[in-house]
């Protein structure tokens, strides 16, 4: 399809009608176009502007014209007759009539200005006044301007509006005289002056018109398919206008799931597909589950890594499950029969009850281990966590951690690496990965998996390890437990295309409306 | 996790090898170190050390030592424990320090060339040890002195705050101990460590000259090391023998690596203590574990030979003694991280290299699932998103003002004791303030606003051993020029219909909502939430200029009604 043909397909009905009307004449006034197209003046103006912008027509010259219509008085005259006509009608029988009686009679019927009508007729020599009695010269009256004036009024009343320039000279003179005599305000006529243009079709316009004819478009194509057309079947006979697809649509305000949440849902779906079962718990936890049960010594600087938010009130958990507390305390103090030397200090059973906001999702793993987990079993949590960190572009006041555990009879270091590789392949679609020795207070051995991101280069994807025996044995689990965590913030920011972690929790509604997690599709 | 600065050239010299920068990142895996930055115009490198239990690695000497085992396996061994040297320097500890800061240890350094780079490294190591391993000087604090003016034996005792005066480092005049704590910058920084004590620890030489007021500050006279010094005295005071001895040992090994001769110092205690009353430093620490050889195979998942295990552990600086089926792995006394046999096994894995293992995916089939409350929440989220509501995730932490005066009528919020900034001082007990915060920040966003959040909140519950419950709320908020109760009620009605429940609204009074336009959402006579038009005062508090209506439902409470399941927190 040529360019012109394409444009022709996108013209709307008004444009098509106007252009085709103009194409027949080369040059036409808008009046002519209005007549030819039978569309309203406002629609015409729109069509002309659109066609101008398509370079299909141009304005050639402007002219002004007067439109005449009847004033209220004129309309009354046209309906009931002018005072002159009414006076003449009374005298038409040929007999003369007493002027005073004539005035009385007509006044009684509510006719205005009887006196001046009589005066005007007398002045024109149409009636004779002798001795207070009036008589009409009928033949002179019929050829006078008065009946002509009356029929002009009726003609205008019938048409509503007429173009002054289109009227015969005599009628134009009558209108002018009417104005002169009575002044604009009392005239039977109203005149409106309009400026109008003429238009000429351009070469492009001609091509467009030819294209319209070639494709049979007349502008009478239907625009909206209606329920009526569907029920009465008229759609079968109709041609439908084609739309201009390059126009911007109007904005819609709809809702959707949050982009970051969709990213988390994506992770959740992946983990469930990999056989993981979800763990959920409380934001508020005692230090026992958040750290002591994870074999993090109460004095150790590793607790500074996880600097915590302490709860103001109540400060302490009422109780800690006694069996777990006894074993964990023993593991800290002397290994507690786990094959470890322990941390060799006096375990503080009050500090362990101190309530904090959970600092790591691993707290859930500890609780799950202590409550008879399934073996084999895989568990995960997408847990909101809290750290005592300065909030900036890479630290949110609260954030999501994704982590969990794997319980199998004979897991080994090789299984640990295999687990991380599955995460890298399934979740991050990483093609190239590397295992790096790492340190976590509660796992030994510990490993980080790094992946090569196509844009960001090598980045950490997550960490994992085998829970220390001091930890798992104290919580009643005999076999090695794989523990893992994924660094999701970076992944989420890549998936959402943002650079500031705080934008994951944006409170700018336009930003939320515009953000999407398309990264999960890639 | 400490980050240290070191010089590339220094590292190479201590390692005895040329190390290219691009090779360094991989070598640093041996010490769980991460190259953080390099300076283009000097050879300074910044390295983060991740292993909290290996303070020996928080210095260039320690990193070089660990690399050397791998790169130069036939390095000469250390001899300051094997060589039987009588201690020529002595410290006497008086009973007065027993309740104050009972423990002291030290050693003598001979023949080291103190220059500025060495001094900087020494200070850095001392600081990292005290800060990250010595609990910011609480567990132990270290002092280093030029040996030349000190007259041994030393006396370690406790004195009254005004009993003596000396000129501390960083000052020009003599100060009493009391004055140091209240006026000297270091005194003010560490005064809390001596809080409640009537006597303070002091180290003096046999002429009465003050070396130090531990754990606060050295004296200017005897305690200022400068370039050109060649002989040093290093001491540490504290409470528990092992970490203190370890810190001293690390410094001794470091200085020995720089060619110094390390001479022992003996310490005698005038009181009964849990350690021997006569101690020699450097102090030999036992960092060893015994385990069956097959533990290596069992944990690694690969059949391993004794030779292979020995080879790789030796290359990591470990000594091996095999007897029958059992192996004893031990290290020099700069390490104290072997708590359990797994710690030695990890050394083997790191030494051999993680990438040398063939990976194996977990084999057992398990059924994946989300918890019932997640299934329920996700159902509600998808339903409400289908109502054309935009989903929001807000922060859980808010300011106290936001959940009290700005949004009155809410359940009280759990508060944080150690607030960092007032913006994040309480845990939300409702999602409404978060959505109002969003509205206040989004008044330029095209209306209507239809937003919702499904998220966890916390409210007090004295019956819970934790003092509170964490539960899941679902909140919808509607805002536009003509938004009102009735429009929002339509959404509530529709949502509850899709939960297959029946409800009624009971008129409710709340400062949060307009009078006569608020209700409790009752199901079988019990309240599961509230709905209303936000009170103009509340909107004004937030600076919101468009009417809002909101409702909140407790999904955790609704869960049993909708699914016949209980929440599943252990």
Image (tube, coloured by chain):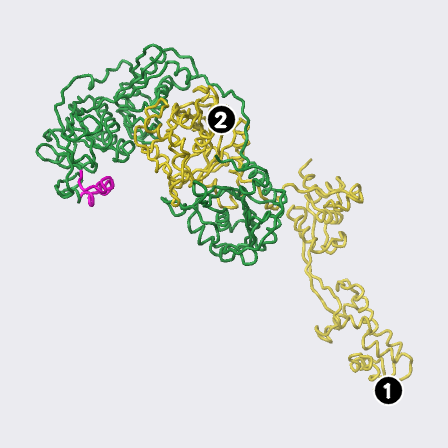
Chain colours: A yellow, B green
- Residue B399 in percent (x, y) is at 42, 48
Q: Say which quadrant the N terminus of chain A sits in.
A: top right
- Would you name the residue on which mark 2 appears? A423
- Would you name the residue on which mark 1 appears? A98
Magenta part of the chain: B179-200
Task: Decide: is A165 above or below B276.
Answer: below
Task: Decide: is A101 above or below A172.
Answer: below
- Residue B289 in percent (x, y) is at 32, 19
Q: Nearer the viewer, residue A32 or A432?
A: A432
Closer to viewer: mark 1 or mark 2: 2
Q: Quadrant of residue A296?
A: top left
Numbered marks: total:
2
Left or right of A397, for residue B165: left
Q: Quadrant of residue A486?
A: top left
Name which residue lies at 49% across and 21% down.
Answer: B362
Cα separation, mark 1 vs mark 2, equals: 120 Å
Q: Say which quadrant the C terminus of chain A sits in.
A: top right
- Residue A248 in percent (x, y) is at 61, 44
Q: Quadrant of residue B222?
A: top left
């Amino acid at each position: 399809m040529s360019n012109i043909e394409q444009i022709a397909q996108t013209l709307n009905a008004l444009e098509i009608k106007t252009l085709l009307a103009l194409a027949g004449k080369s040059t036409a006034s808008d009046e002519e176009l209005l007549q030819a197209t039978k569309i309203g003046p406002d629609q015409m103006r729109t069509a002309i502007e659109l066609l101008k912008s398509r370079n299909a027509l141009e304005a050639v010259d402007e002219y002004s014209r007067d439109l005449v219509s009847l004033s209220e008085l004129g309309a009354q005259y046209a309906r009931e007759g002018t005072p002159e006509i009414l006076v003449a009608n009374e005298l038409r029988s040929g007999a003369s009539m007493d002027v005073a009686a004539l005035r009385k009679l007509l006044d009684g019927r509510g006719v205005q200005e009887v006196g001046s009508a009589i005066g005007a007729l007398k002045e024109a020599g149409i009636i004779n006044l002798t001795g207070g009695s009036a008589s009409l010269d009928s033949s002179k009256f019929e050829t006078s301007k008065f009946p002509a004036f009356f029929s002009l009024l009726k003609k205008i009343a019938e048409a509503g509006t007429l173009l002054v320039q289109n009227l015969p000279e005599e009628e134009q003179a009558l209108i002018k005289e009417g104005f002169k005599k009575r002044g604009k305000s009392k005239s039977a006529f109203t005149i409106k002056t309009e400026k109008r243009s003429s238009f000429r079709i351009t070469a492009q316009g001609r091509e467009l018109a030819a294209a319209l004819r070639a494709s049979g478009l007349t502008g009478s194509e239907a625009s909206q398919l209606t329920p009526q057309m569907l029920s009465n079947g008229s759609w079968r006979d109709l041609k439908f206008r084609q739309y201009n697809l390059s126009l911007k649509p109007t904005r819609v305000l709809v809702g959707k799931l949050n982009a970051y949440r969709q990213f988390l849902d994506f992770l959740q779906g992946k983990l469930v597909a990999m056989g993981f079962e979800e763990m959920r718990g409380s934001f508020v936890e005692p230090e026992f589950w958040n750290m002591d049960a994870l074999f993090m010594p109460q004095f150790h600087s590793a607790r500074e890594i996880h600097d915590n938010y302490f709860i103001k009130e109540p400060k302490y958990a009422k109780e800690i499950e006694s069996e777990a507390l006894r074993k964990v305390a023993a593991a800290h103090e002397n290994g507690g029969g786990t094959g470890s030397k322990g941390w060799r200090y006096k375990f503080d059973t009050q500090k362990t009850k101190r309530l904090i906001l959970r600092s790591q999702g691993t707290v859930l793993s500890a609780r799950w281990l202590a409550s008879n987990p399934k073996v084999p079993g895989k568990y995960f949590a997408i847990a909101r966590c809290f750290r005592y960190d300065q909030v900036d572009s890479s630290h949110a006041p609260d954030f999501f951690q994704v982590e969990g555990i794997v319980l199998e009879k004979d897991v080994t270091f090789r299984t640990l690496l295999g687990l991380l590789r599955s995460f890298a392949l399934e979740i991050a679609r990483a093609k190239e990965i590397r295992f790096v020795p790492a340190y976590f207070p509660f796992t030994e051995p510990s490993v980080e998996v790094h992946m090569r991101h196509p844009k960001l280069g090598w980045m950490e994807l997550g960490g994992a390890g085998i829970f220390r025996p001091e930890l798992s044995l104290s919580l009643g689990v005999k076999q090695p437990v794989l523990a893992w965590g994924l660094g999701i913030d970076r992944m989420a920011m890549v998936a959402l295309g943002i650079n500031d972690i705080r934008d994951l929790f944006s409170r700018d509604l336009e930003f939320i409306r515009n953000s999407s997690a398309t990264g999960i599709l890639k | 996790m400490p980050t240290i600065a070191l010089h590339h050239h220094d590292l190479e010299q201590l390692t005895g090898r040329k190390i290219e920068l691009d090779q360094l990142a991989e070598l640093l895996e041996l010490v769980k170190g991460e190259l953080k930055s390099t300076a283009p115009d000097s050879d300074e490198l910044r390295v983060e050390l991740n292993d909290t239990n290996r303070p020996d690695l928080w210095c260039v000497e320690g990193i070089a030592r660990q690399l050397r085992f791998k790169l130069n396996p036939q390095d000469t061994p250390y001899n300051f424990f094997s060589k039987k040297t009588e201690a020529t320097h002595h410290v006497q500890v008086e009973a007065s320090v027993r309740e104050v800061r009972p423990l002291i240890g030290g050693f003598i350094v001979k023949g080291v060339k103190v220059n500025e780079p060495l001094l900087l490294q020494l200070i850095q190591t001392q600081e990292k040890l005290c800060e990250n391993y010595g609990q910011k000087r609480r567990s132990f604090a270290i002092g280093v002195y030029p040996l030349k003016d000190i007259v041994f034996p030393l006396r370690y005792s406790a004195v009254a705050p005004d009993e003596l005066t000396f000129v501390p480092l960083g000052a020009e005049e003599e100060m009493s101990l009391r004055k140091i704590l209240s006026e000297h910058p270091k005194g003010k920084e560490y005064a809390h460590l001596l809080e409640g004590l009537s006597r303070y620890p002091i180290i003096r030489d046999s002429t009465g000259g003050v070396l130090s007021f531990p754990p606060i500050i050295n004296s200017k006279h005897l305690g200022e090391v400068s370039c050109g010094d060649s002989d040093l005295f290093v001491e540490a005071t504290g409470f528990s023998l092992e970490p203190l001895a370890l810190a001293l040992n690390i410094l001794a090994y470091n200085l020995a690596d720089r060619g110094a001769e390390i001479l022992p110092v003996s310490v005698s205690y005038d009181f009964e203590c849990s350690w021997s009353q006569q101690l020699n430093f450097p102090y030999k620490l036992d960092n060893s574990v015994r385990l069956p050889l097959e533990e290596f195979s069992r944990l690694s998942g690969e059949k391993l030979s004794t030779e292979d295990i020995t080879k790789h552990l030796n290359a990591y600086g470990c000594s091996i003694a095999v007897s029958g089926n059992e192996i004893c792995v031990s290290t020099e006394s700069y390490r104290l991280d072997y708590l359990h046999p797994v710690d030695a096994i990890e050394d083997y894995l790191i030494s051999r290299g993680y990438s040398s293992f063939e990976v194996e995916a977990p084999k057992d089939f398990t059924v994946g699932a989300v918890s019932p409350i997640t299934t329920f929440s996700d159902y509600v989220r998808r339903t409400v998103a289908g109502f054309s509501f935009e989903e929001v995730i807000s922060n859980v932490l808010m300011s106290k003002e936001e959940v009290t005066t700005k949004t009155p009528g809410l359940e009280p919020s759990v508060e944080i004791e150690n607030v960092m900034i007032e913006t994040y001082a309480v845990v939300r007990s409702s999602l409404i303030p978060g959505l109002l915060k969003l509205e206040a920040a989004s008044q330029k966003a095209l209306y209507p606003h239809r937003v919702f959040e499904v998220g966890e909140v916390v409210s007090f519950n004295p019956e819970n051993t934790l003092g509170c419950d964490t539960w899941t709320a679902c909140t919808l908020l509607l805002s536009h020029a003509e938004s009102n109760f009735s429009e929002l009620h339509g959404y509530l009605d529709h949502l509850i219909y899709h939960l297959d429940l029946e409800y009624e609204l009971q008129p409710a009074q709340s400062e949060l909502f307009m009078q006569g336009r608020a209700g409790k959402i009752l199901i079988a006579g019990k309240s599961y939430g509230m709905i209303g038009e936000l009170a103009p005062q509340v909107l004004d508090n937030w600076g919101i200029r468009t009417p809002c209506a909101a409702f909140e439902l407790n999904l955790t409470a609704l869960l049993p009604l909708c699914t016949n399941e209980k929440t599943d927190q252990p």
